[in-house]
Image (cartoon, rainbow, N blue to C red):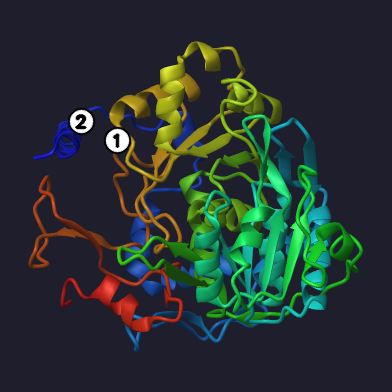
Amino acid sequence: MSESAQRQGDAFENLLHEERRFPPSEEFAAQALAQPSLYEEARSRGTEFWADQARACLSWETDFTQTLDWSEAPFAKWFVGGKLNAAYNALDRHVEEGRGDRVAIHFEGESGDTRSYTYAELTESVKKAANAFESLGVQKGDRVAVYLPMIPEAVITMLACARIGAVHSVVFGGFSADALRSRIDDAEAKLVVTADGTYRRGKPSALKPAVDAALEKEGSTITNVVVVRRNNEPVEWTEGRDVWWDDVVDTASNEHTAVAHDSEHPLFILYTSGTTGKPKGILHTTGGFLTQTAFTHKYTFDLRPETDVFWCTADIGWVTGHSYVTYAPLVNGATQLMYEGTPDTPHQGRWWELIEKYKVSILYTAPTAIRTFMKWGRDIPKKYDLSSIRVLGSVGEPINPEAWMWYREIIGGGKAPIVDTWWQTETGAHMIAPLPGVTSTKPGSAQVAMPGIAVDVVDEMGESVPNGAGGYLVIREPWPAMLRGIWGDPERFKQTYWSRFDN
């Protein structure tokens, strides 16, 4: 056995013997959004539980007539016959209902520049971007590649695509030109939206050169490249193809009607690394994805949109940034913080400084970051007022009990519940997580399937294993935010996700 495998085995063994439990405080439980009855409600209602959530969380222009069509399994259709617009649900309706002055996004650049967008201002910006993209020939169903840093224009671009019915495909800004080109080609994207660059650890970092390199080889489907001015670095320019964001978006009309799309209309493609070398284009659709992300965002984090400030530190290049930056917080009418930079620039207290400044109440980040902060020492966060924190989240990888305890005690003041969330690109939204105010939390464990989610652990034969035994984690029933396939490759979808067990 390799040293790495031995360490993993030891860590797994330690988790099995973790006995500490932290029940919710009486005060938190008394006011929690989630109640224990939510699990029973989900069990007794079956798929209609999700119909209830779809109608509670979203505005539908046309109501759906069937909650789930599983007749062509493993290809699910949720909320059949329903029509809605993702951008309208994230923006316009809040303005129409009198919440236009609420801050949607507080943005802080690495260099300290700041911008805040109210829901009314963000709606106007998205309408302008939608008009600009349409003027460049983007139509419903077209794919748009997004290669941007963590700046508001990234969210604006994604929502403008959703408004039109174009399908965005975000590529992480750290990926190479070759990775970008392979994703552009696979999706047959018409437009790329990028920036001249960004800032990283105090220095300008170029982005557009990777786009130029990606498009050097002939045969690309791209007709235009829209470039956001971010760090004012000199860029190469291809006349007739490249256009500045300022020139097409800022000058566009702010009048744009959000047309409702079918519940199963594609919302986005997000590529994950494939074991065969070719990336897998995970496809998510509108109604199911929005329903489950909004529901989980509300209950996993005990969200109070009127008073909370939510901060998910994930990049929009990953699914966490799609589900819990671009979509769920805005659909739920929350205020969120968006930060461009790294945790140690200009100093190692940067995150805690931002939490103090914006009074962040819900922090959602990765165990790798938490372990880094542990190494830097507790004296750094102790310099800042973190008393606004009331819920802490963990995402992206298992969190070891030591990091979990440090997070709770040092960042959460020994009282903020930790929600350790298990999910992945393919699931679209949280699948396993404790509910604050309901679950007695356990260090290092995601613990309990979310209401409405059926999970199991099985052996090689697909039989359920007893408690405490290891095996394969499987999902027994369809769920709204499940992937609808691998873009352009239905056989690979079935082979990858549905061939291991017969049932």
Quarter of the picture containing the N terminus is top left
Residue 68 in which image quadrant: bottom left
Question: Residue drawn 30% across and 63% down?
Answer: 275
Horizontal and vertical percent position of residue 53: 51, 65
Q: Earlier in the sequence, mark 2 or mark 1?
A: 2
Horizontal and vertical percent position of residue 26: 43, 30
| Circle 1 crowding by C-alpha within 10 Å: few under 14, some 14–19, many from 20 | many
**Mark 2 is on which residue type?**
Glu
Horizontal and vertical percent position of residue 459: 10, 60
Q: Residues under labels 2 and 1: Cα distance?
A: 8 Å
Q: What's the mark number on residue 348?
A: none
Is 274 on the left-hand or right-hand side of 343? left
Location of residue 306 with respect to 50 vertically, above or below: above
Question: Residue drawn 61% across and 44% down?
Answer: 304
- Report which residue position mark 1 lands on: 444
- Report which residue position mark 2 lands on: 18
Location of residue 220 with respect to 390 vertically, above or below: below
Secondary structure at badge 1 equals loop
Closer-to-camera residue (132/25): 132
**Do the CB atoms of the residues marked 2 and 1 lie less than 8 Å apart?**
yes
